[in-house]
Amino acid sequence: MTNNYRAYLKTHLRNNLKPLLFIVVFSVVLTVALAYTNQKDVLNYYYNDKIRITYYCTIWIPVMILAISCYIAPYMEFAFFKKRRNLDCAYALPISRKEMGRAHYFSGLLTIFLPYTLSYITNTLLMLRYQQEYFFTPLIPHYFLCLLFGICTYSIFVFVFNEANSPGDGIWFIILWSAVFYLVLSAVRNDLFLEFLNKTTWRKITSNSDLAFVFSPLVFISEAFTDRVERPEWYTYTRLFKDDEVIFCLIFWLVVGIAATIAFFKTFGKRRMEKTEEISDSWFGYRILVPVYAVAGMLTFGSSGNGTIILEVIIVILALLGYAIYRRGFHYKKSEIIILSLLLIFLFI
Amino acid sequence: MIEVKKLSHRLGEKIVLNNVDITIPDNTIVGLVGINGAGKSTLLRLLSGVYNADFGQILFDGASPEEASTRQNIFFLPDDPYYTAAMTPAKLFSFYKTFYPNMDKTAFEQLIREYKIDVKGKMRNFSKGVRRQVFIALAVAIKPRYLLLDEAFDGLDPLSRKLFKDAIIEFVENERATVIISSHSLRELEDFCDRFILLDDCQVKQHGDIAEHVSNFCKFELAFTDTVDKALFADLPVRAIDIKGGHFVQLVLEGDSEEMRTLLTALSPVVMDEIPLDFEEMFIHDVEKNRGVKNDE
């Protein structure tokens, strides 16, 4: 760690202090507002012929704030690198690009860590006040597990954001990557082209495509821990997901998160500054996402899937728009015209 | 010493620099000239480590600017430098001081005073020229061994230009630094640059000592009683020729002026005057010549 890295990180954190404070304060205020409202909502049920009253468990509030921070932090930290004017000065500084990327990555971690942690503490204090009958020990592993998967999600978003050459494209990449696996799994579940796979195993894994959404681990963990926080003898929670599905989901997103982190640190220092503000032609961007969304959308929502022909027309229009956003105009390349033509053929079949 | 060896670079599909070779000695002020799109800014970005070269090598005292440690000795001032919305000259100074701990606060404050800039004013409220002045003051205060300035005079008023040139000359004398300045104000460059590099058609077309380069050429105004055409001067080393009304000729010749005067006398002009030739004119003739060679090919 060089002196210049420390100096850069210090200066960067100081410059980010105001927006970070704003996010932290906003998160705490939001937590108080949501927790207060929800904890006052009572849940009545019978247990041993006696009516029992408890309150909704609100551990989802800090997790929701963590999820929102995962979207905000990559933009806050890396939009700077999407303007040539900024890079003319930044890349001429006596600090390596790798170190600069590391500084922004860790500063982004603070942007997810601080609001989440303070929101968690606030929510726990409110739970201690209003929901004393709950078990609080499971909150500790819940906090750390969510933080771990929050970091994974943040890393994925950081990587895909940095594959874009403009902040706008970066935002699109984050949004599209959030649900790409979900959509692909939904398409696969229609069994249109996976007859050859061992359906038993495959079905087990893919039976619930909700687990393939980028925030699925956070949802699952919170759901499982809600079960443990609330008194089990009072209330049996009907869990949404089965254990084997969930383990696969956690391992999958952990692997994707680690891979994204490694890929980010490997590629950040090597990115060509000349590409900044140009069309984002990364293989992790529109180039792959538009056809994947179009095909998966057709299989899932098309007339051969669960949807209608109108939805298919909408998907073709969205694919056209997707490529227009990619190319920044209505001029398509040969490969894109082929994909669009195939979609149209699919539509008429 | 800066050594550029067989440097080539593309921006997208377009070749911007092709096989550039230059050596810039220490303690010099170099003017980087060329028409728009010649590759001046690209070369400065490559020199400063902002771009990584596609092919070839750049060495500052044997070290690549792609290494962060080499950039400790380099300061690059781009055409439109970055600053945050809340940035003031004082904050900018503090920011750069974290990277260049030996920054000279006195030199910075002195220049800021001379430019009459509010050190606590917001950069975003300053005009382009004033912002440039702040960055020039920073560049001088950093005292880098190598100072790279893109479009250095852009937005500066005549007084600021003078202050800027004085500051650079003093800086080079005191620090024994090397300065590379790109600009379209060739008359300004001629005033205080020792050397020049002319970029054209992705390559270095000319480089060397400005005074020496200009002294290799001479310019004459001639008048003839009879009508003349270009053929009359075919045997002379003509760099540029302009014939008006068939009788009046303006000539730029390559070679010693006395020798050229003797050759021209032999053509029996009724009037012959040698007129001064400046760097800007030389630049235009150099570029036109290069274009002519290319067209002939």
Image: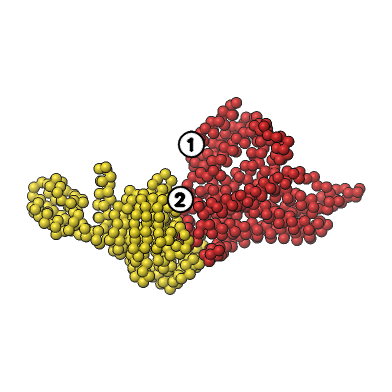
User: Which is nearer the N-term, disc 1 or disc 2?
Assistant: 2
Query: Would you say A349 lies left or right of A143 here?
Result: left
Q: Are marks 1 and 2 in contact (CB under 8 Å)?
A: no
Q: Residues within 10 Å of mark 2 (few under 14, many from 20)?
A: some
B82 relative to A227, above or below: below
Residue B70: % across, % down:
45, 62
> Label 1 is found on which chain of the structure?
A
**What amino acid type should be assigned to the residue bearing mark 2?**
Glu
Query: Between A348 and B20, which is closer to the camera in this rendering?
Result: B20
A332 relative to B254, above or below: above
Residue shown at the point (73%, 55%) measured from the top left: A142
Query: Between B70 and A129, which is closer to the camera in this rendering?
Result: B70
Residue B58: % across, % down:
40, 57
Q: Tell me the tag on residue A274.
A: 2
Q: Colour of chain B?
A: yellow
Residue shown at the point (45%, 56%) measured from the top left: B50
> Label 2 is found on which chain of the structure?
A
Q: Residues within 10 Å of mark 1 (few under 14, many from 20)?
A: few
Number of marks in the image?
A: 2
Query: Would you say A259 lies left or right of B34 here?
Result: right
Residue A86: % across, % down:
48, 56
Q: Residue placed farthest to the right in the image?
A: A49
* The chain coloured red in the image: A
User: Which residue position is annotated with label 1?
Assistant: A333
**What amino acid type should be assigned to the residue bearing mark 1?**
Lys
Query: Between A68 and B211, which is closer to the camera in this rendering?
Result: B211
Q: Residue placed farthest to the front in the image?
A: B62
Residue B132: % across, % down:
41, 62
Asked if one can make out residue A129 in the rendered structure from this viewpoint, the answer is yes
Residue shown at the point (48%, 69%) measured from the top left: B101
- Res A65 → quadrant: bottom right
* SS label for mark 2: helix
